[in-house]
Image: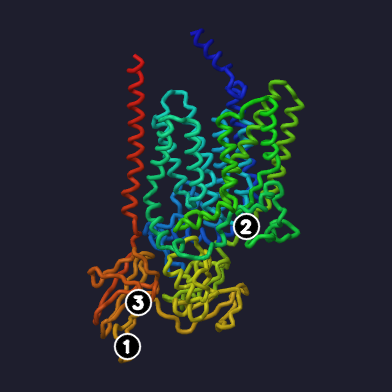
Amino acid sequence: MKKKNGEAGKTDSVKSPSGMNRSREVYFGMAALALMLVCVCAVYTTLPVLTGKEFLLGSDYVQLHMHRIEYLKESLSEGRGVPGWYSREFLGTPFWSNIQNFPLIPTRLVFFLFDSVRAYYFAVILAAALSALFTFLFCRRAGLSPASSAVAGWTFACAGFFAARVTVGHLTLLEGYLSLPLLLWLAQRWLRDESGKRNSAANLVPLALACAAVCLSGHPQLPFYAVVAVSLYILWTERSREAFYAIGSMAAGALSTLFVWFPFLLLLRRSSRALALEPPANDIPFPYGRLKAFVAPWADGWIGSLIEPEKAFTGYPTLNYFWDTVCYVGIVPLLAVVFLAAFCFIRGRNPGKNASFFILAGTLSLVAALPFINGFNSLVPVTLLRSPARQVYVTIFCLCLGLGAAVHVLEKLARERRSAALAFLLAVIAFIHVTDLGRHDRHFVKGYPFVGCGIELPDLDTRLKGSLGDARVAVDYDAFIRSNRRFDDAGFFDAVALADTYSSVLRMGGLGEKLNTELIEGTTLPAGALQKLGVKYVITARARRDLKPISSPGGIVNLYMISSPEPRASFVPSRGNVTGEEWPVEYERASSDRMELKCGAGTDGMIKVIESWDPGWSATLDGKKAPVEKIEGFMMGVKVPSGEHAVVLRYRTPGAKAGALLSLSGPALLLVILLAGKRKRERVPEQSA
């Protein structure tokens, strides 16, 4: 018993790689982790937002993501499940097959706990905190001290790359930001497993699940960079069959998401991404001139009221160049990298295998983001990843690791030399860094007076509900009013639009056949186009001289009416309307995915529906299958004979069933890997014997 106690005491006194007593390091690590998370939350929190007087501003979130979330919550509350079709924009567009509409990731549960406006703040906090946490855990696994790991984690979560996207509201990018540290932590957990069971389910299953989660995070760009970087890291670190077990488990996780990705890839093939258009304004390489933003983030100016007094961002074609090139992580991480290089040179030390990888990865990622690489994008027929400037995501993470490594080295020197002066210097450097980067980030944390899900205009809402009927509206996308996206809108704001509808609206609006944009506001289209699209009301802050004004609700927007808009569903005789008699069509929308039509005509013809044609639509005529034809280039039509008839249109996501079957390959591959690893471990003792 004494021996055991003695051994236990001896074990407790063993020092960790960072040179600290293990039990003491555990307590210190918990304190460092807690302090790091508190500091992360403090950066992205203001008192009015925390108390509910204001909401955290994210422009794209308010104009895009919030409406999709509300649409899904409305469908679920009515017991209809996840909709396949999104009816409220651009004559309808696929909902389920567009992964950016509502990613199936655990962190999205926050949107069911709060109203959609407030939930954005909690989503940002959750994304930042998890990014810091996984960076901390990876650094600890890599052998860094608790303090240095906390510094690296805080810096990554508070890097300008993340903070800038809070203001602009890039929700799916924020949610995918944790991908790299999460996968690296789990990969490092596998690489440094001392139990001799690196191929066990305890190691590979979490890696597969994490890879599946990041692949479902909505925006493919950061997860793609993360998966590639971590796969290369595993091969760099473990050049044996073991490496392929880990990479195979990540592949299994990615394959298990094909139930979403296969329909999405099919959607891309029939979307505006596949059209021969002009280069999009948001496909941005990292300009050489913006490299100075790593040191001087405001050198080229800024946007709007980020800082007072205002200084316009100049020298680049669009404001997108600002948002996609915010890369500031502070001056201290850059100096830390210089310090590490000098330290290794003076001491005659090799940076080490792992450090060499991150030096190479950070450098190559930055080089690949520069303009001379962007020319190869034209060789790809479908645009999947835009804006190569975002590859600095990997560079920023590597800089954060460099800062953590430098703090670790200085901390170790201070402990070995018992130098209070060096410890004090470390504290001063940390204070300067937190102050510097924190002040930079706070410019991107803006509150806005909380007014629910938009300003309520009772007169406008009453008019729309009472007289709109089956017609559409056209509303300014940035109009923060309750009516926005509560009714079917002729415009759209999305990264993916159906190609036929997109091309047709470009022609109808006189916008040119090659325009490549993610935003077409119905309020800017000419009256003739709006009439053809079935728009009855135009709600805009703009003055439209070609339209007759009705009122100015709340003094916020102008309300116009379109005379004689085409009905949502109408009957078109096959030989022309010789008698001049009209046969109206009864239109009822039971759900986003189902339309019921009734018509009694005295001649053969076609029921025309002003809704985007898509291969997911099917029809029944009096209970029997009938083809859905594409008419006028982008609308739907169903042929009907003379007499009384009922037509039902249903939408089912193309590729959903095939994607579900294909996704089973993920668990199957993971099972094969686990069995192969188990057989290998069972053979080892026999060979030893």
Q: Are marks 3 and 2 in contact (CB under 8 Å)?
A: no
Q: Name the spot of residue 198 as percent of width and height, x first.
A: 42, 28
The one nearer the camera, 474 or 365, is: 365
179 over 641 or under it: above or below = above
Q: Which residue is mark 2?
A: 321
Q: Amino acid at mark 3?
A: Lys
Q: Amino acid at mark 1?
A: Asn
Q: Earlier in the sequence, mark 2 or mark 1?
A: 2
Q: Earlier in the sequence, mark 1 or mark 3?
A: 1
Query: Which color scheme did the rendering employ for the protein?
Result: rainbow
Q: Name the spot of residue 576 as percent of width and height, x first.
A: 32, 87
The mark closer to the camera, 3 or 2, is: 2
Q: Name the spot of residue 48 as percent of width and height, x first.
A: 65, 53
In this rendering, position of residue 442 left or right of residue 283: right
Q: Which residue is mark 3?
A: 608
Q: Amino acid at mark 2?
A: Tyr
Please tell me whether mark 2 sits on a helix, a strand or a loop.
Answer: helix
In this rendering, position of residue 637 left or right of residue 63: left
Q: Which residue is mark 1?
A: 577
Q: CA distance from mark 3 to mark 2?
A: 43 Å
Q: Are marks 2 and 1 in contact (CB under 8 Å)?
A: no
At a point 45% along the width and 84% down the height, the residue shown is 564
Q: Earlier in the sequence, mark 3 or mark 2?
A: 2
Q: Are marks 1 and 3 in contact (CB under 8 Å)?
A: no
The mark closer to the camera, 2 or 1, is: 2
Residue 649: give its label. none
The one nearer the camera, 449 or 204, is: 204
Please tell me whether mark 3 sits on a helix, a strand or a loop.
Answer: strand
Q: Callout 2: few (<14), some (14-19), or many (20+) C-alpha neighbours within 10 Å? A: many
In this rendering, position of residue 502 left or right of residue 619: right
Please tell me whether mark 1 sits on a helix, a strand or a loop.
Answer: loop
Q: CA distance from mark 2 to mark 1?
A: 54 Å
